Every structure is written in C-alpha cells, then in structure tokens.
Image (cartoon, coloured by chain):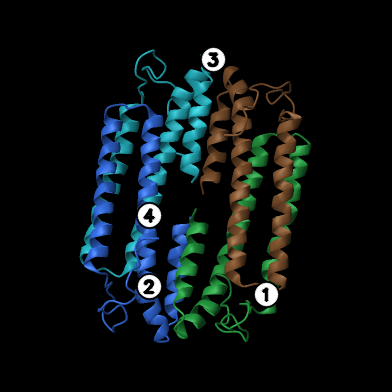
Chain colours: A cyan, B blue, C brown, D green
Amino acid sequence: MEEAQPLRQEGDCHGAGERKAHHSEKFKSNLLARLNRVEGQVRGIKGMIERDTYCDDVLNQIAAVQSALNSVGRLLLEGHMKSCIVERIEEGDHAVVDELLVTINKLLK
Amino acid sequence: MEEAQPLRQEGDCHGAGERKAHHSEKFKSNLLARLNRVEGQVRGIKGMIERDTYCDDVLNQIAAVQSALNSVGRLLLEGHMKSCIVERIEEGDHAVVDELLVTINKLLK
Amino acid sequence: MEEAQPLRQEGDCHGAGERKAHHSEKFKSNLLARLNRVEGQVRGIKGMIERDTYCDDVLNQIAAVQSALNSVGRLLLEGHMKSCIVERIEEGDHAVVDELLVTINKLLK
Amino acid sequence: MEEAQPLRQEGDCHGAGERKAHHSEKFKSNLLARLNRVEGQVRGIKGMIERDTYCDDVLNQIAAVQSALNSVGRLLLEGHMKSCIVERIEEGDHAVVDELLVTINKLLK
C-alpha cells in the first residue's frame, strides 16, 4: 500500500451541498502524475496502431495501461475510504456503504 | 462481436523481418476513435481530481475507462487471432500459440 | 443488490476475543445454498474432464463457476461492510479500513 | 507456464461426430488434482460460514479459490489451444477462432 494517507483532511465530503473530496496536495499530485503517464501510454498505443505495430505488442501495452489504471483506482479507493467513508459512517450516514458497494462492484468487473 | 473482420488482409505478420499488423483502414479507425475517447476520459479524470470532485464519481469514471479499454483489447485480440494467428499456424509456426497465451494471461489479470 | 441486509445483528465482530461474523440465518443459508451449487459445479467439471469433454465446453463451465463465486463474494462483502465494518468504524477502530482494503485488492485481482 | 504440453495427441476434436478433448492422462490428472483441492476449499468455506467465521477470513478464502480456479482455466486454455485449436485451423476450420474468442471473453469478465 502507498505511504499512509493521513486519515482525515480538512474539507467537506459530508456537507449539505455538493460533496467534495479533500485529499492532500501530495496525494493529488501522485494521482495526477500517474494519470499523465496513462494518458501518454494511450497516445502511444494510438501511434502503434497507426504504424501497424504487431498486435501482440499493442495488446501488451493495453494490459500495461489497464494495470496502471487499476493502481490509480486502488489508491483513490484507499484515500476515499480513509476520509469520506469513515467520516460519513461516524456521522451515522450509512447510505455511503451502499454507494461504496455499487462502486466496488463496478471495479470488480 | 464487432462486424465480421475479413479474415486475411494483405501484409506480413509472418515475414522474416519485423512483424507487422495488417488491419483494414476501417478497423484501424474504429480502434483509434475508441482510443481517442479513452484519452479524453483520462484527461477528464485528471480534471476531476484537480477540482476535488467527490471520489466516488471519479472511481466510477475510472471503471468506465477500464471498460472502454477492455473493449479495445477484445477487438484487437479478435483482429489479431483472425489474421496473424491463423496465418502463422497455417504455416506451421506454432510458437505463436505460446506468444498468444502469454498475452491472454496478462489480459486475464 | 440482494434484499436489504438488516444493518446490525447481535454478535461481536469487535469483541476482545476472536472476531466472529453475525449474519442472519436467512443470509447464511442463502450463501450456503449458492456454495452448494458451486461445489456441485466443480464436481461436474471434474466429470467433464474425466469424460474428455471438448475443452471449450469445460472452459465455459469454469467461467460460470467463477461468476457464481464472484456473487458469493459480493454478497459477503456487502454483509461484512453493513455489519462489522460499520460497527468497528463507529467505535473508532479504523484499522478495519486497512484490513478491508487488503481484502478488496485480492478480490480485484 | 506448466510443463510443455505435447502439441498433438491422438484423438478427434475435429471429427464429424461429437467433439472430444484428447489430453494426456498426466495433464488430466493434474487438472483433476487441482479441482479436488478447489472442491475441498469450497467445502471449507461452507464450514467457515456455518461457524460464523469473521467475514474477512472467508473473503480471503474465496479469493484463494478464485485464483486456483483461474489457474485451472489457464491450463485448460493452453491445452485446448495447443491441440484442438491448432488442428482445426490447420484443416481450414476457422470457425474455431470465433468459438475461442467467445470463451476467452467470458474468462476475461
């Protein structure tokens, strides 16, 4: 698992208004750096297809992007569970559990 | 399954030199259009994180990109199997089966 | 999602001693009925292999068992999150979040 | 990958009648030994649920069974591709490629 994410940040994932995330800037830049790489890899795959690169090589690149994207999803799930999920449960807002289950089931697909 | 991909295209995934794919332009533009959307979705996720969008919404977007990327992988696997894999097996080049198994196992992860 | 699982059952997944689940008998018999079917399907696959059944048919049966097992896992994850996870978070025992993340990551594999 | 599976066995996955697998007895007993363990593990999970074992432990066991079942699937896919798939392609029976793609897509789920 990534460096321990401080459990609670200032912010309001449980305010009356629009729910917001409240990750540290360090956590956000880690996610953004990974997503930049994913974006570059996707562009790279487009180039491979344009150049008629042998499919097996392209398929391996797609598997690499899927793996990188999985890592981003896991990091975000961890950050979410250690902040908003805990906060909303502690306030008795158990609806967040159903919300989380729906999302986890999509990621499990 | 996508419209029937004509089984064999001119091209040489089995030449002595560097192996190349030989998909129809229609197939390639289909893949490229999908990858353009994936690239845009990844950029969209970066924006969501920069704007502190509620994590559950971001996680759902990541699941959508994974699903779109899976579709590209499946289309490419089909195109690959109906062209290079069949050609190389027909020429007795059974090493392609091990190559394909390694790639499928990565996609199965 | 399966019929709403009553959020809290009598029982002690947060006692000092050995942690125990505390599902309703109805929930447990649902899980057990599904697992009985999975067990039968696995036995069926063994029979198919013994009888040299065409591999494609056997592979499809394996995919069906995986899907049935996934359903059991999701049901159990839901029951777990709506009982022990919520209880332990409400008592300030946030270590349960790391425990859950490790398990979810294994299921995501 | 498992010990090299001899590419072709006597047998008729391409006869007019019912298609049959034709694996070596050694390969079959390897698959059956693995499936025996899976069957035992499923029975073990039923026991854990009957004894109200803490859900996290049960979920980890489910992940272990899924992983063992995946291994059986991959072995069988390899055996299938190195026998029937190659034979039927070599005889010009390309319909086997579509059949295989449908099965792989189910395993990719």
- Asked whether the residues under marks 4 and 3 belong to the same chain, the reply is no
Q: Which residue is at 50% across, 81% downward?
A: D88
User: How packed is label 1: few (under 14 Cα within 10 Å), some, or many (20 or more)?
Assistant: some
Q: Which residue is at 44% across, 77% downward?
A: D94
Tell me: residue B48, above or below residue D47: above
- The disc numbered 3 marks a residue on which chain? A
| Tag 1–tag 4 contact (CB < 8 Å) | no
- The disc numbered 4 marks a residue on which chain? B
Q: Name the residue under label 3.
A: A92
Q: Name the residue under label 2.
A: B82
Q: Can residue D34 be seen in this view?
A: yes
Looking at the picture, which amino acid does disc 1 mark? Asp
Left/right of residue D5 with respect to residue C21 in the rendered view: left
- Asked whether the residues under marks 1 and 4 belong to the same chain, the reply is no
Give the SS element for disc 1. Answer: loop
Q: Distance between the residues labelled 1 and 3?
A: 56 Å
Tell me: residue D48, above or below residue D101: above
The image quarter containing residue C33 is top right
Q: Distance between the residues labelled 3 and 2?
A: 55 Å
As drawn, the label of residue C52 is 1
N-term mark: 4 or 2 = 4
Give the SS element for disc 2. Answer: helix
| Tag 1–tag 3 contact (CB < 8 Å) | no
> What is the x, y in percent for residue D75?
58, 68
Tell me: residue D14, above or below residue C41: below
Q: Distance between the residues labelled 2 and 1?
A: 27 Å
> What is the x, y in percent for residue D81?
52, 74
Left/right of residue C16 with respect to residue A5 in the rendered view: right
Q: Distance between the residues labelled 1 and 4?
A: 33 Å
